[in-house]
Amino acid sequence: MANKNNELIIGVDLGGTKIYSAVVDRQGKIIATARKKTKSELGFDVAVKRIADCIFEAAENAQVDFTSIKAVGVGSPGPLDLKAGKIIETPNLKWKDAPLKAKIEEYVKKPVKIDNDGNVGILGEYAYGAAHGAQHLVGLFIGTGIGGGVIINGELLHGYNENAGELGHMILDPNGPKCGCGNNGCLEAFASRLAIERDIRIAEINGVATHVFEGMEDKSERLRSKRLAEAFAANDPAATQAIENSAKYVGYGVASLLNIFNPEVVVLGGGVVEAIGETYVKLVRQVAEKNVFAVALRNVRIVAAELLDDSAVLGAAMLGWQIAK
Amino acid sequence: MANKNNELIIGVDLGGTKIYSAVVDRQGKIIATARKKTKSELGFDVAVKRIADCIFEAAENAQVDFTSIKAVGVGSPGPLDLKAGKIIETPNLKWKDAPLKAKIEEYVKKPVKIDNDGNVGILGEYAYGAAHGAQHLVGLFIGTGIGGGVIINGELLHGYNENAGELGHMILDPNGPKCGCGNNGCLEAFASRLAIERDIRIAEINGVATHVFEGMEDKSERLRSKRLAEAFAANDPAATQAIENSAKYVGYGVASLLNIFNPEVVVLGGGVVEAIGETYVKLVRQVAEKNVFAVALRNVRIVAAELLDDSAVLGAAMLGWQIAK
């Protein structure tokens, strides 16, 4: 019998701007990690090569023989075709019908399992993080876009075509701003990092003071969450207004999700939440609690993801364990 | 061994304006029915007596001995405390902490099981109606208020405090009209029969032509769905506008629910849908299909409830079978 203690999984968090991979053991401990920019604009084939490199790099950093890696789990933006292992389309990466699982398997010669980024995020928090022990969870991950994931009675909600949990595309105002998905007024269009950035740029044009672009070589570059957090901490008027608006709309979304799912724990994660921290979560909580039936709040927690940047790689690792031989 | 074929259940649909009860056999066949006005404004105790009378009347109409009734199932507006068998609060009936199960049991001397009106509605359609055979369903019931119910893998979604499925209280615009629940811009505040009536009255004040109140002794009386349907069929300007707006917002709600749950079937029921019919469902479908990821529509049906007024009593009867000795 093989020594199961030497078996490892690599979990991959494929995001709109970066790839993050981690070598994870049976206890959910991260042995080593690696990071790369996604560079999705260079096309799917280039990005897949970068994903594979990021996987190999994490294994190198862990100083383990690649044979001890039993499988790879990947959290990807959706919608996905889970059975075929393909990305159907992604508003943020602009890829269509991309054979993610097969291409990564070609490079790494290990079994690969993929799932929605929101699903792996909530899976990580369920197994090792803020929601450990709860059986009814909703996760919202506010980054470049907004991913979601739902666990009911301890099981991921996948739905009929396995694409449930697109919580970022709840409509919060049909006359609201255009969303990356093509519709108007989705939660993502109000509250994602891209929405916050858009609101700051509009506010600046309208004469609201902001220092958020200061020191940037190219002012048209995307604003990172870290820069947003710094501006928020410094009470930058345009940034504060945009971030508070994001939290407010996430609060409305959470109110709806509480009435819809009546979960025990709502986990808020992703780059924006991580960077701004508890102040953001508190704003969300205030708005959500004002807009929901009292019973849907009874003993219910609305909390920040505990694993921070690691919830998706740890959830992805759990996918890997599901297929590890 | 008792002859199981003689066993019957009474299912009760407790609504904001009327009580509807039905004697149902093992095959889901309705033997006889009875109806009464709820008269909720006279208080909980009066209404419970009316519920009991409606139950006895259905049994009388069925011409069966009351001993053959094994249990009673009741669909009630929520939120409910299922374990205690109580209504916690209901925006439309204005009751709080009302011991529905115990009080009905006192009168009828049979075991009673209660669940949310939306839950029994979708349960009825799941077992005997439009969604028969599907395992992932979402139901929206558009009447005085808007009830919802969700079935995932063949099981009702109840959630942590057993109050999941309050789909009428999804927020569709935080700056929208006031809802009976106290919040703003819930689906119910845009699309229920009361919302349609409100919109017609506002339109009339604003000079939009309407014949909808013609022939009513008291113009301040509630508009019945039948009257709305007649006005819609006659192209009454104010009624048409209000009903189309209702369908449009239900469409936005369905779009969100498709992205959230990715169900196989969305069932639209309740007095408004029943009265207006397929034209209403078609409008909902058009708006929903425009505002959702393509994958969430693959082989997905958005259909009218087939059991019409009977979906809730048949679902309630299924609750009864669950506790029948």
Image (tube, coloured by chain):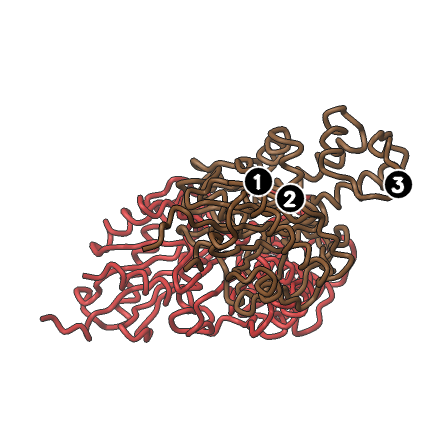
Chain colours: A brown, B red
* Residue type at tag 3: Asp
Q: Name the residue: 44% across, 44% down.
A: A127
Categorize mark 1 by other alpha carbons within 10 Å: few (<14), some (14-19), many (20+).
many
* Mark closest to the chain's N terminus, 2 or 3: 2
The answer to whether A321 appears left or right of B278 in the picture is left
Q: Looking at the figure, which quarter contains the C terminus of chain B?
A: bottom left
Label 1 marks which chain's residue? A
Label ID, residue A218: 3
On the image, the x and y values in percent for residue A225 come to 71, 37
Q: Is residue B149 visible?
A: yes
Q: Do labels 2 and 1 share a chain?
A: yes
**Which label number is shown at residue A268?**
1
Please name whichever residue, A147 or B129, is drawn nearer the observer in this view of the structure. Answer: A147
Chain ID at mark 3: A
Q: Is mark 2 on a helix, strand or loop?
A: strand
Query: CB under 8 Å between callouts 2 and 1?
Result: yes
Q: How crowded is mark 2: few (under 14 residues within 10 Å), some or many (20 or more)?
A: many
In the rendered image, which residue does mark 2 sit on? A142
Nearer the camera: disc 2 or disc 3: 3
